[in-house]
Structure formats: structure tokens, C-alpha cells
Image (cartoon, coloured by chain):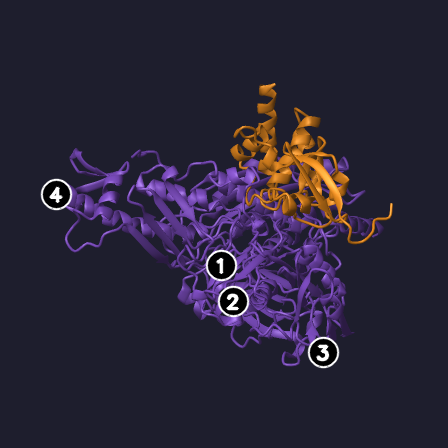
Chain colours: A purple, B orange
């Protein structure tokens, strides 16, 4: 068998999954077609808040092709569970189909199943629902007021939790003795994820075996199986198989258990035929979990030297009408603990109100809490720099946590102990690449020529690969946050890696094969990677929070260690050598000092299965399973610099240059990491400049299509300049950190800071996102009037 | 013309060199015909307002969004979908470019991107970055930030020029 000496870790290897995608031969959920398959369409509430007086499905049931109509009265299943419970949290019951009341526009009220998708939609239009409209509330802060409409009788003031972190007294003391206090209300607007593949599911129930098979656009098939089987459908997990095949992007929105897959699974059994549902994009806008939506008041205290001495943050987090699967986690533990950023801040206090409103549920969206925290901190740093008349780069430098890379963690005042960090070099590199000093020198003269150039910096930290599980449990997680891996070696030496992580664009089939081939010294062609099918992989937690490489990858490395250990024993036995005298390299075990005495990987694999001559007492076979529970998060960081030009006549923003210097530790495949950084930057820029999920005050969604919700397009973005510093994480065997969300976290404040910087001559100190031409033009016009 | 309800109309067209004919509802969108009736699932549906471009195909040599046409409007047309782009097992240079330059992540927008890029390169065989970005304005990608899609199309342009 061929072997290779070449190290694959760190190489930009072309992706193995690409040939099927570039030839149109991927298999996404909507491509699944089963014999006898039927099609579902949902009847959804057009009201943000309404009593359901009656549902008349008689006409719909008589429509050509319509097979069944089910309402909340028929579908007897449990409510959709919430998987993160903060102390004292009030969790509203979230029915799969509305029960008596609808609480947001788009909430599913009934399902129509027909012989074709078109017939199902015709049927859905014919279902007559009589509503009694109630007043609605869409704003998280307004929902807290006494006079605001109440969503649930049992949840007064619509407040489902109040959560704090940090030292209140110490923070108040810091503000009392501050030389400067900077205050700023900040809106972090609601975003709608918009993975380009809409959510979809196909459910098939076998009356013969009692097994339910669900194809679903999921980032975590076992989480779907566990929550649906145990909490909603009340069936044994053994009787449910979840397959999440090729998935067209997730960004968080495909983590959660939604109404549609629950109702479709129930209906497949009730009807005795497979049922498919594929979201139309307008349904994605209405019922995919949204992101962000914070109303914040932030205050920063600084001493005479420009050192931050305190940070006080009050946030109303809009969670929508019900608690989505991990909703409470996002504005609490993924938000407050990030407020120290890369800075030494002695006192921080953060209060969060988790609010229910008549809007679609809000949950994790790329970055999830961390972009919200970074936006607060980085906007406040720039705001403070302006107030103190300091260069924003200099203010950041003064406040950086000094380098700590010896394995001793840095303890922040808000729970986290950072694994390692060295922040100054990343900023230095980003400033060099952007030509910062020269840009600053030219800034004032160009203003004189009518050109308004702005420079925005963001030095960020991220926490990813959440865990360890025991800590997550203590903080409210209803699940562990480890990851599984399994490596099975075939008698011919080929290897299959089974991972609990899920790829929906991340390229695991390539990176995990790189890892395995590298460790075993065999060509990548001999390694297969399997994910996304509960019948094939061990129980796994899936992909979100930039955890696949650091947690999922580590689980695979643990498996490979076990495989090599057993292989060594077999090789030593065959070579009649001492185990300790063997070295493994180039796909073979050889005896130290006598390289001719060796056993190749293939020979050892074969013997493990022949078992004709293996050490006494050893079990035959060669495979290993690992469940890797990390000891800490990993903490990637970096510095981004954006250079923009604002046209004060039209309010338009042009991005002239974008520089990203990220530190994600060691990198398995730089091409893939760069790609994720690019995409993340684009999404973050989308938030800064264009994207806004807008609800009218009463809860009507105004940005409900791609015509109204402005996604980043090719012609509005530049090519990005990316570079890296490398500070390996000491907490996992690979030295890797998360890389999937850094771009999104860093770029939003970098762009916002740049635009506000460009508007400085007009006296603008802050504008809320998105920084649309309309908003900028108005601010400039107002300044001119003054 | 008034089309009666519940009638089916005959259509005939060539898709990837194969002649196909069916009777379809007048309201059947071309993209659903290609995916559901003909069974070519490489052409994707990403929106319902013709913004995303995931359904882009080549129809009589023009890149069109197949969600924006009724099947009956394509009667007699010559269509190429993503499945018809590679010839004799050899990838089209645009497909190769997307692979070489990591122009895709989740792959869902990719067929439409590639089909749009084909027309782009017919219009501009040596496109500037600005031209590429402008021409892709009708295709949305949420994964790549377009950075590597631009590189992929530049790669394809270079290699197609070499072939001529």
C-alpha cells in the first residue's frame, strides 16, 4: 500500500466534496424523492397576535390532490423544547401548531398534505381561519412597559429572564472614580440568517418496523433526534433515524428544532406515506430563527491615562414569541462574558432582560452573542477615543491584556479564563497591511477636497468550541458539549472517519481526511469521512459555535491515537520487538536503529482482522471511538481594519479596503479557513451596512423577502486582504481554535467605526446600524442645518 | 389567451442534449419542471422573488432564472443545466475554476453561479474584477463573500483563453 511522508496538516488541499457540487450532483434534502411521497404546505398566521376562533378546512379537504389537513387539535405532540435554562427562567409552552392563539406572523396554524407541492399550496390557501386580532408588540424594550400587550398570562411584563454577570459594586466604584465616562445607547438590529438553501424536511414512517426516518436540513442530526424523540414525539430514539445530507449553509439557523419537521414527522405516520416540506424563502423569513436584536445602554469609565476602568451594560434582548432551542444562552453566557474583549478591564457589570415579543423566535446566528458583545465594546472604544481625542489604535494598545502564551490562562472579571493571547502583533500587522499611518495623515487633507474617508478598527476576541460539558451544565445547558469521533480501519487498510460534527459548507470531508491521513501516514484517497446520519455515526453534538475542528477534530485525533496504540502492539508482536523500540512514520512501524525491520500500516491492519497472529488476549479488529470533552473554550482573536469612503451627497458607503488579521491558532487547511473568514466578513458587513429584519410596531414583518432584506451582493463588496498570526491553543491536542465566526464578529464594528469616522467632520459620534444611505444622508443633512 | 383551469399543455424541449416532452400544468415553473419532472436536481431554488439566482440555467444561450419562467414558455427551447456543462467526463473550465480557487462552500448557490459565470465570460472573455462583480449582482452567495468566486471566474477566463 502506498504511503506518504508529506505532512498534510497546514496544506491548502482542494476540497474533496467539490466535484459533486460543481456538477450539480449534491444531495440536498429537497432532492430526496421517495416512492409515494406527498407534499406539505403550512397555513400560517397573518397576525402578529390573535385568538384563533375557528379553523374551517372543509373546502381545502375537497380540493383536487389534497389528502389531509391537520390543525393543532389533531397533532398531539409535546411542545418544542428549550435546551438552555437560566436560573428562574420562565419558559412558555411552544406548540408545534398554534393552540388557540397565534403569537407571531408566520406561526404555523395548520398543515395541508397533498399529492403535489402545488396542490398542497392551493389547499393551504383554501383553509379558512377566523382570527380575533389582538394588539401586538415587536420591540424588546417596549414589551417591558406596563401597558404593553402580554404574550402569556403566566409571564408578567413579557420578561422571561433577568440575568447579570460581573461585580456591580466594583463597577459602580470604578465609575465614581473615573476621569472620563462615555455613554452610548446602541441598537444591534435584528438579522434574518438567509442560508441560500431554505430549510426542508422529508419524513417517512415504516408501519412494519415502526421506524421514523427524517431527512432534515440540520447542523446537528443527533440533537434533532434526541429532542424530537424524547420531548416532542415521545418515541424511542432507537426508532428514529435523522439524516442531514448535503446542507446548503446554516449560520446557526439549522441548529434548532422547528415546528415544520415535528409536524411533518407526525403526519408521515398519521398518513402512512412519506411527507416532504420545503420552505419558500418567504417562509424562511417568517419562521427561521432570527439573530441579534439587542437594545443596549453602554457606559465606559476611563482613567486619566486612557485606561478603561469599568464597563456597565444594560441590554434588552428580544427573543421573539417563544424560546427557540438555545435562545436563552445567546444573550447571556455567549454575550456578557465577552465584554472584556482583548482588554484588561478591572470591573464589568452586565444586566440582560430576556424579552418575549410578537416576532419570530431569535436564537444563534453566526457569532451568536459574541458579535453583539464585540459591537458594544469596539464601538465604545472608538466612542471613547473620539471623546479623549486619542487615536483609536493607541487607545486599544493601552488597554490590551499583555501577552500570555505560556499556558497560564488570563482570568477576566466576567467568568472566562482565556486560553492564550498575544493581541498587539495582530493589530500591528493589520495596521501595516492597511497603510494605517499614511491613511490617517491623508485623512484631513482629503476632507478638504470633499472626500470623506473613514478608518475603522476592531480588535476582537471570540470564544468558541463551548464547554467543558460540566461547566455548560452548571450554566443551564440541557446537553453536553463534547464531540464524538470514530475511526474504523478496514482489513485492506482503508479508513473511515465518522464524526459527530456536521459539514454544511465547512469542508470536513477534506480537513478531517487531512488529519487522519496525516496521523496514519496514508494517502488521503484511502480515507473517507462520514457525517450527518444518526444510523452511521456515533451520538454527536453537531456543528455550531466554531467547534468542529477544536472539539470534533480533537475527538478524531483521540481515536487515531488509540488506533496507533493498538497497531503498535500488533506490529511489535509481529516484529518480535519491544513496543517502546518501535517508531511510527511514513505509514509503517519500524524498529529504532534497524529501519529494515518494519511492518507497514496495511500489514498491521490486515493482521488485526485475520487475527492469526496477534498478542495473546487482544481482541481482533481495528477501530476506536472517542468522546472528547474540551477543558475550556478556545479564544481566537485578531484585528480588522476597514477603510471606507462616504459620499455625503448621497449617503452611500464604498468600502475601499478591508484587512483582516486573525489568530485561530494552528490551521489545518488555510484555503478553507480563509474562505470562512471571507464569508464571515461579508456577513458582518451586511449587518453594518444593509441587513435589517424590520417589524412594524404591531409585529408585521416588513422585510419579508429578499427584495426588502438587503443581503450582501458581489458588486458591493471588495476583495479582502487576509493574514494571520499563530498563537496555538494550549487546550486541545491540535492547537487549533475556532475559525468559522471570526469574520462576522470583527467586521461589523470595523465597518461601523469606519463610517462614523468618515462622518466625524459632520459632528456625528454614532449612528445605529444598518448604516444605509438614507440614514447617513439624514445625519449629514442635520449636521449641515446646525 | 385564456388558459382554462386544470388543463395540461404539451411541452417539448432539449435539455443537456436530450429531447424531453411532457404534459404540464400551465402554471408549472420551469425550475420545478427541471427538478421534479425531468429529475435534474442540480438546479436549485433559493428564493421566490428571483433575487438569489440559484436556479440559473442556460436557455437558448442566455442565462435565465428558471424560477422566473413557466415551463410552457420554454416550449421548443434548448436548455443547458449544470449537469450538462461537463463534457465527456471533463469539467468545464468554470467548474474547474470553482474547484481550484475554492469558489464554493455549501455548494447550494454554485450551480447558478457557474451558469451565470458562463454568460459573463461570453460577454467579457477577459473580465475585470469590477465586471465580474457587477455581472454576478443577480446571484447570491452567503458563504464565500464572493472573494473566491471572483478568483474562480478569473481562473476560468485565463484557462478558456488558453484553449481558444
Indicate the chain on which mark 3 is placed: A
Which secondary structure, mark 2?
helix
Q: Quick check: marks 2 and 1 in contact, CB under 8 Å?
A: yes
State the image quarter where residue A597 is shown. Answer: top left
Judging by the rendered image, the residue that carries numbered circle 1 is A242
* Residue at disc 4, secondary structure: loop
Residue wearing tag 4:
A576
Which chain is home to disc 1? Answer: A
Q: State the separation of the CA atoms marked 2 and 4.
A: 53 Å
Q: Label 1's element?
A: strand
Task: Measuring from the top left, give residue A287's x and y in whole percent.
Answer: 65, 61
Q: Are marks 3 and 1 on the same chain?
A: yes
Label number found at residue A229: none
Chain to which the residue tagged by mark 4 belongs: A
Q: Chain of mark 2?
A: A
Confirm or deny contact between disc 3 and disc 2 (CB under 8 A).
Answer: no
Q: Nearer the viewer, residue A571 or A751?
A: A571
User: Upstream in the sequence, badge 3 or badge 2?
Assistant: 3
Helix or strand or loop: what does disc 3 sit on? Answer: loop
Looking at the image, residue A512 lies above or below residue A66: above
Considering depth in this image, is A703 or A286 the residue closer to the camera? A286
Residue where numbered disc 2 is placed: A228
Q: Which of the two discs, 3 and 4, labels the residue nearer the N terminus?
A: 3
User: Would residue A27 be visible to someone looking at this image?
Assistant: yes
In the rendered picture of this protein, how many numbered marks are placed on residues? Answer: 4
Label 1 crowding class (10 Å Cα cut-off): few <14, some 14-19, many 20+? many
Q: Which residue lies at the image location 54% right of the left edge and 77% below the top edge? A: A88
Note whether A551 is above or below B140 in the view shown. Answer: below
A757 vs A539, left or right, is: right
Amino acid at each position: 500500500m502506498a504511503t506518504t511522508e508529506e505532512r498534510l496538516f497546514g496544506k491548502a488541499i482542494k476540497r474533496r466534496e467539490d466535484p459533486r457540487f460543481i456538477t450539480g450532483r449534491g444531495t440536498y434534502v429537497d432532492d430526496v424523492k421517495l416512492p409515494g411521497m406527498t407534499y406539505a404546505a403550512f397555513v400560517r398566521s397573518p397576525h402578529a397576535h390573535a385568538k384563533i376562533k375557528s379553523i374551517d378546512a372543509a373546502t381545502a379537504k375537497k380540493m383536487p390532490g389534497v389528502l389531509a389537513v391537520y390543525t393543532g387539535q389533531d397533532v398531539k405532540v409535546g411542545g418544542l423544547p428549550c435546551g438552555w435554562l437560566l436560573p428562574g427562567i420562565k419558559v412558555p409552552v411552544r406548540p408545534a401548531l398554534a393552540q388557540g392563539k397565534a403569537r407571531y406572523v408566520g406561526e404555523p396554524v395548520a398543515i395541508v398534505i397533498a399529492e403535489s407541492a402545488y396542490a398542497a399550496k392551493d389547499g393551504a390557501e383554501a383553509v379558512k381561519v377566523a382570527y380575533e386580532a389582538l394588539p401586538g408588540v415587536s420591540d424588546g424594550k417596549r414589551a417591558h412597559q406596563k401597558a404593553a400587550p402580554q404574550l402569556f398570562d403566566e409571564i408578567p411584563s413579557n420578561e422571561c429572564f433577568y440575568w447579570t454577570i460581573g461585580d456591580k459594586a466594583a463597577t459602580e466604584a470604578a465609575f465614581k472614580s473615573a476621569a472620563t465616562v462615555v455613554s452610548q445607547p446602541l441598537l444591534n438590529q435584528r438579522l434574518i440568517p438567509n442560508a441560500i438553501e431554505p430549510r426542508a424536511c422529508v419524513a417517512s414512517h415504516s408501519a412494519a418496523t415502526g421506524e421514523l426516518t427524517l431527512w432534515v436540513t440540520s447542523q446537528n442530526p443527533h440533537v434533532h433526534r434526541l429532542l424530537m424523540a424524547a420531548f416532542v414525539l415521545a418515541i424511542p430514539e432507537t426508532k428514529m433515524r435523522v439524516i442531514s445530507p448535503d446542507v446548503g449553509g446554516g449560520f446557526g439557523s439549522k441548529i434548532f428544532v422547528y415546528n415544520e419537521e415535528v409536524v411533518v414527522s407526525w403526519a408521515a405516520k398519521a398518513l402512512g406515506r412519506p411527507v416532504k416540506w420545503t420552505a419558500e424563502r418567504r417562509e424562511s423569513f417568517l419562521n427561521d430563527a432570527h439573530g441579534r436584536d439587542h437594545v443596549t445602554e453602554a457606559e465606559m469609565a476611563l482613567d486619566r491615562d486612557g485606561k478603561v476602568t469599568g464597563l456597565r451594560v444594560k441590554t434588552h434582548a428580544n427573543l421573539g414569541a417563544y424560546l427557540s432551542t438555545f435562545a436563552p444562552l445567546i444573550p447571556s453566557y455567549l454575550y456578557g462574558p465577552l465584554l472584556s474583549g482583548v482588554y484588561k478591564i478591572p470591573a464589568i457589570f452586565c444586566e440582560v432582560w430576556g424579552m418575549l415579543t410578537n416576532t419570530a423566535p431569535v436564537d444563534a446566528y453566526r457569532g451568536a452573542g459574541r458579535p453583539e458583545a464585540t459591537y458594544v465594546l469596539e464601538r465604545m472604544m472608538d466612542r471613547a477615543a473620539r471623546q479623549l481625542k486619542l487615536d483609536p489604535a493607541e487607545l486599544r494598545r493601552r488597554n490590551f491584556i499583555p501577552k500570555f502564551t505560556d499556558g497560564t490562562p488570563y482570568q477576566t472579571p466576567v467568568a472566562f479564563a482565556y486560553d492564550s493571547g498575544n493581541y498587539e502583533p495582530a493589530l500591528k500587522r493589520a495596521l501595516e497591511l492597511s497603510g494605517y499611518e499614511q491613511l490617517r495623515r491623508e485623512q484631513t487633507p482629503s476632507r478638504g477636497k470633499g472626500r470623506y474617508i473613514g478608518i475603522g478598527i476592531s480588535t476582537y476576541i471570540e470564544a468558541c468550541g463551548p464547554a467543558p460539558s460540566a461547566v455548560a451544565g452548571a450554566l443551564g445547558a440541557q446537553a453536553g458539549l463534547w464531540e464524538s469521533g470514530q475511526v474504523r480501519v478496514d482489513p485492506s487498510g482503508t479508513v473511515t472517519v465518522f464524526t459527530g460534527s456536521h459539514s454544511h459548507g465547512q469542508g470536513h470531508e477534506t480537513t478531517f481526511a487531512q488529519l487522519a491521513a496525516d496521523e496514519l501516514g496514508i494517502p488521503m484517497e484511502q480515507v473517507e469521512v462520514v457525517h450527518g446520519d444518526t444510523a452511521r455515526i456515533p451520538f454527536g453534538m453537531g456543528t455550531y459555535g466554531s467547534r468542529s475542528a477544536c472539539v470534533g477534530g480533537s475527538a478524531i485525533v483521540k481515536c487515531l491515537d488509540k488506533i496507533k496504540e493498538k497497531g503498535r502492539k500488533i506490529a511489535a508482536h509481529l516484529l518480535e520487538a519491544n513496543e517502546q523500540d518501535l517508531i511510527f512514520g511514513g505509514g509503517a512501524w519500524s524498529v529504532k536503529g534497524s529501519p529494515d525491520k518494519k511492518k507497514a500500516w496495511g500489514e498491521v491492519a490486515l493482521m488485526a482482522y485475520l487475527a492469526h497472529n496477534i498478542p495473546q488476549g487482544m481482541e481482533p479488529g481495528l477501530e476506536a471511538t472517542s468522546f472528547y470533552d474540551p477543558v475550556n473554550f478556545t479564544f481566537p482573536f485578531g484585528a480588522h481594519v476597514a477603510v471606507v469612503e462616504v459620499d455625503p451627497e448621497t449617503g452611500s458607503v464604498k468600502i475601499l479596503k478591508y484587512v483582516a488579521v486573525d489568530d485561530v491558532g494552528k490551521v489545518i487547511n488555510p484555503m478553507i479557513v480563509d474562505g470562512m473568514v471571507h464569508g464571515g466578513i461579508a456577513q458582518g458587513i451586511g449587518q453594518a451596512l444593509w441587513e435589517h429584519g424590520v417589524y412594524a410596531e404591531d409585529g408585521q414583518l416588513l422585510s419579508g423577502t429578499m427584495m426588502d432584506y438587503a443581503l450582501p451582493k458581489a458588486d458591493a463588496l471588495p476583495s479582502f486582504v487576509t493574514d494571520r498570526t499563530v498563537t496555538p491553543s494550549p487546550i486541545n491536542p491540535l492547537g487549533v481554535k475556532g475559525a468559522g465566526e471570526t469574520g462576522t464578529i470583527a467586521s461589523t464594528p470595523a465597518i461601523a467605526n469606519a463610517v462614523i469616522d468618515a462622518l466625524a467632520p459632520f459632528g456625528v459620534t454614532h449612528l445605529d446600524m444598518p448604516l444605509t444611505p438614507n440614514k447617513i444622508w439624514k445625519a449629514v443633512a442635520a449636521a449641515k442645518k446646525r | 389567451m385564456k388558459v382554462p383551469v386544470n388543463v395540461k399543455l404539451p411541452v417539448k424541449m432539449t435539455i443537456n442534449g436530450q429531447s424531453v416532452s411532457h404534459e404540464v400544468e400551465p402554471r408549472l415553473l420551469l425550475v420545478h419542471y427541471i427538478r421534479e419532472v425531468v429529475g435534474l436536481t442540480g438546479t436549485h431554488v433559493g428564493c421566490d422573488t428571483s433575487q438569489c439566482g440559484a436556479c440559473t440555467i442556460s436557455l437558448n444561450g442566455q442565462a435565465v432564472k428558471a424560477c422566473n419562467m413557466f415551463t410552457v414558455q420554454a416550449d421548443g427551447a434548448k436548455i443547458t443545466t449544470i449537469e450538462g456543462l461537463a463534457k465527456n467526463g471533463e469539467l468545464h473550465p468554470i467548474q474547474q475554476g470553482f474547484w481550484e480557487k475554492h469558489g464554493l462552500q455549501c455548494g447550494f448557490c454554485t450551480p447558478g453561479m457557474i451558469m451565470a459565470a458562463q454568460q459573463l465570460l461570453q460577454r467579457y472573455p477577459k473580465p475585470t474584477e469590477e465586471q465580474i462583480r457587477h455581472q454576478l449582482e443577480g446571484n447570491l452567495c452567503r458563504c464565500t463573500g464572493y472573494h473566491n468566486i471572483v478568483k474562480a471566474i478569473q481562473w476560468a477566463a485565463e484557462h478558456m483563453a488558453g484553449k481558444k
